[in-house]
Image (cartoon, coloured by chain):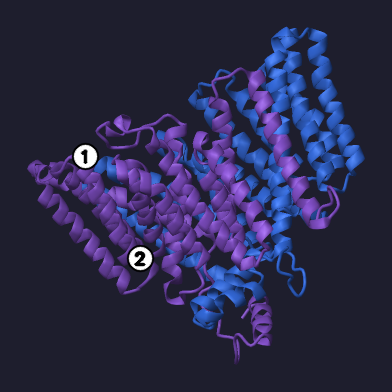
């Protein structure tokens, strides 16, 4: 049914495709041989790899469709259900998901996804509890309790997405604690940014330290997500200080310290170009805000805006040059 | 040469496809987020440059009549683009490339402004679309080509409302994008340009349907499409379906699949085309996923999957039926997809439900 390949190859890594593209680009492979070379390199997947791909795609899409059909069915009948029936439904779903984790096995992907579903459904259960009994609790408490209930699942699951969900809940609880009504006061906003920076920074440090001891935690995408969640509030705090002319020295000092740590760790200890790119973006954002505040607003003419354009080009060029040189150095 | 290059070189050498010593390591090539970083700041710098020139004429020189003259706007736009082209051709430093990108984007802004000032809306949009096509061919920069290709394709797919153009555009852009990705390695000299056109086409295809789905109106038209016979509504999905057949057929040829597999693929494609007539975006996103898988391109697959989930969600959300009916449709969809999976595995393995 499919052309048989000499041997079944696993799906190639992105680096392999890049290496192949570099060879073709450099003229090392004759155009007439390029397709054959691509097949040998694994860039063109064989029949079995296509089969595996279609298998996973149909399974995921089919599973998603079924899951949402159940959700919509429940949503349709929600109004007609009594209090006990609603709780039974949601608690039943939680139990079912957990049983699915138990049966599938803790080390399998299906088991871990089932445990993640359990964690998500816990949030639904808490929301139902709050809605039904109108306890008067603040919104942040829902996410805080959810985070607490999720903790044992995250500990036994050993699954990075569960811990990312846990981190998201921490941030949601903090955001709602500092401004429950959704409209930020300046002081509360400033405090929130500091607390988010500290909380996410602590989680990032802990995760990096543990990743060396637990391979399942060594997920770059999760660490990069946390790094974004750490640097963004700090950068916004510095920018806010620039524009509000409040005390800049503390945010600037903390920012410089964070920058030094990011550089030291991700340049030498745990090479990660994405983290260095994040740091570069933060620096540029702050310098741009300083220029806008002290140059553009003061000079108020086309020259100042032109200066901004040139400054942006210069800074981003410097950053890209440096990032590419670092990347080249790691490749050798 | 790093370990990956070495392993690849060795396996190709064993098959007689390359000879001699492996080449010296060239530019490592940047991860995608570096390109996004450059593109974003290039765009931002262009915005400031555009503002600076506008402020210069409006406030500093008090020549606001300048902006009423399409010829002058076109002149300054072409001048900036010309400078950008010259800078890019000199292939100098990263700073120069950045500056060139900013100059070109600012220049395109003036060209667009002049076009709308000098022609009717449809004429201006066609002019800009054609201009972007020229830029996609001639500007020697990857990010620039992706941007120009995307804008040109969107111009054909969405921005301009002309009967024949809109009917043909969908199939033509899909066929072109498919051809590019299926032949990306066969023209080494053009590889960087081909990939840029491929990404631009993909981005345009995946985003173009959001206009319909989100109930927006990006097009510049005169309402003539509303007066066309019903058959025009079917021509577009038909032509896109033909383009999809071209893509799937090429993949089957590459895999040297049996005829019955090709027939099965054609049946599945027909079902997808029919579904896509009511659910815009499904077919193009699925084809992007297929093209990504065909070339082991994770970025294409990611774009396709994100688009597929978006359009599928939008379709079900916007269905004017009760939640119960939506649940039933989703149930049927889920069971159908799982049945297809079971059938596929059974045909291949001869046993129900075993994964390969």
Among the 4 quarters of the image, the one containing residue A123: top right
The one nearer the camera, B327 or A177, is: B327
Q: Position of residue A75 (x, y in %)?
A: 69, 18
Work out which quarter of the rendered image holds the C terminus of chain B and state it.
Answer: bottom right
Q: Which residue is mark 2?
A: B97
Q: Which residue is mark 1?
A: B121
Disc assigned to residue B342: none
Q: What shade does chain A have?
A: blue
Instruction: Decide if residue A269 is on the left or right side of residue A211.
Output: left
Instruction: Decide if residue A313 is on the left or right side of residue A35.
Output: left
Q: What shade does chain B have?
A: purple
Q: CA distance from mark 1 to mark 2?
A: 32 Å
Q: Is B321 placed above or below A297 here? A: above
Among the 4 quarters of the image, the one containing residue B161: top left
Residue beneath the point at 13% across and 46% down: B57
Q: Is B319 placed above or below A267 here? A: above
Q: Position of residue B36 (x, y in %)?
A: 47, 55
Q: Is A283 placed above or below A297 here? A: below
Task: Say if mark 1 contacts mark 2, CB within 8 Å.
Answer: no
Q: Is B73 placed above or below B137 here? A: above
| Disc 1: CA contacts within 10 A as few (<14), some (14-19) or many (>=20) | some
Q: Is residue B299 visible?
A: no
Give me the chain letter of mark 1.
Answer: B
């Amino acid at each position: 049914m499919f052309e048989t390949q000499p041997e079944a190859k696993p799906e190639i890594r992105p680096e392999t495709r890049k290496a192949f593209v570099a060879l073709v680009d450099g003229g090392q492979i004759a155009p007439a041989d390029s397709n054959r070379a691509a097949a040998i390199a694994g860039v063109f997947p064989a029949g079995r790899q296509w089969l595996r791909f279609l298998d996973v795609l149909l399974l995921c899409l089919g599973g998603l469709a079924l899951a949402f059909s159940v959700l919509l069915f429940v949503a349709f009948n929600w109004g007609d259900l009594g209090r006990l029936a609603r709780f039974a439904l949601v608690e039943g779903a939680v139990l079912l998901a957990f049983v699915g984790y138990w049966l599938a096995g803790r080390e399998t992907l299906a088991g871990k996804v089932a445990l993640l579903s359990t964690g998500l459904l816990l949030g639904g259960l808490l929301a139902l509890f709050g809605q039904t009994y109108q306890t008067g609790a603040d919104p942040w408490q829902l996410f805080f309790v959810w985070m607490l209930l999720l903790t044992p699942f995250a500990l036994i699951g050993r699954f990075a997405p569960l811990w990312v969900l846990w981190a998201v809940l921490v941030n949601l609880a903090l955001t709602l604690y500092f401004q429950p009504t959704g409209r930020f006061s300046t002081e509360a906003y400033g405090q929130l940014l500091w607390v988010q920076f500290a909380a996410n920074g602590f989680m990032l440090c802990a995760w990096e330290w543990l990743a060396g001891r637990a391979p399942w935690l060594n997920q770059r995408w999760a660490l990069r997500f946390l790094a974004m969640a750490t640097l963004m509030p700090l950068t916004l705090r510095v920018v806010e200080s620039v524009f509000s002319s409040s005390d800049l020295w503390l945010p600037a000092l903390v920012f410089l310290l964070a920058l030094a740590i990011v550089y030291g760790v991700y340049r030498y200890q745990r090479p990660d170009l994405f983290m260095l790119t994040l740091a570069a973006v933060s620096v540029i954002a702050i310098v741009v805000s300083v220029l806008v505040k002290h140059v553009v607003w003061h000079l108020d003419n086309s020259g100042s805006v032109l200066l901004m354009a040139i400054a942006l080009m210069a800074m981003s060029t410097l950053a890209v040059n440096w990032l590419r040189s670092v990347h080249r150095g790691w490749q050798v | 040469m790093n370990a990956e290059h070495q392993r690849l070189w060795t396996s190709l050498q064993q098959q007689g496809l390359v000879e001699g010593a492996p080449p010296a390591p060239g530019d490592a090539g940047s991860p995608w987020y570096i390109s996004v970083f450059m593109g974003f700041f290039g765009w931002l710098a262009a915005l400031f440059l555009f503002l600076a020139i506008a402020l210069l004429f409006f406030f500093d020189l008090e020549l606001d009549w300048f902006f009423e003259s399409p010829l002058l706007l076109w002149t300054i736009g072409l001048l900036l683009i010309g400078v950008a082209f010259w800078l890019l051709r000199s292939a100098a430093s990263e700073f120069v490339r950045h500056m060139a990108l900013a100059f070109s984007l600012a220049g395109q802004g003036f060209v667009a402004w002049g076009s709308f000032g000098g022609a009717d809306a449809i004429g201006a949009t066609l002019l800009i679309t054609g201009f972007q096509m020229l830029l996609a061919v001639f500007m020697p920069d990857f990010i620039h080509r992706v941007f120009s290709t995307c804008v040109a394709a969107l111009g054909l797919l969405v921005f301009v409302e002309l009967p024949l153009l809109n009917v043909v555009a969908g199939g033509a852009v899909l066929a072109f994008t498919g051809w590019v990705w299926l032949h990306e390695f066969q023209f080494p000299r053009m590889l960087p340009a081909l990939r840029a056109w491929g990404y631009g086409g993909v981005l345009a295809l995946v985003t173009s349907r959001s206009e319909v789905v989100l109930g927006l109106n990006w097009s510049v038209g005169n309402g003539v499409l509303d007066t066309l016979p019903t058959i025009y509504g079917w021509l577009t999905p038909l032509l896109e379906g033909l383009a999809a057949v071209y893509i799937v057929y090429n993949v089957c040829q590459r895999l040297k699949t049996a005829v019955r597999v090709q027939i099965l693929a054609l049946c599945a494609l027909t079902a997808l085309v029919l579904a896509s007539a009511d659910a815009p975006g499904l077919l193009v996103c699925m084809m992007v996923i297929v093209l990504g898988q065909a070339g082991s391109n994770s970025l294409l697959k990611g774009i396709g999957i994100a688009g597929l989930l978006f359009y599928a969600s939008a379709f079900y959300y916007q269905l004017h039926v009760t939640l119960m009916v939506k649940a039933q449709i989703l149930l049927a969809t889920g069971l159908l997809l799982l049945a297809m999976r079971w059938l596929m595995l059974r045909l291949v393995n001869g046993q129900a439900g075993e994964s390969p």
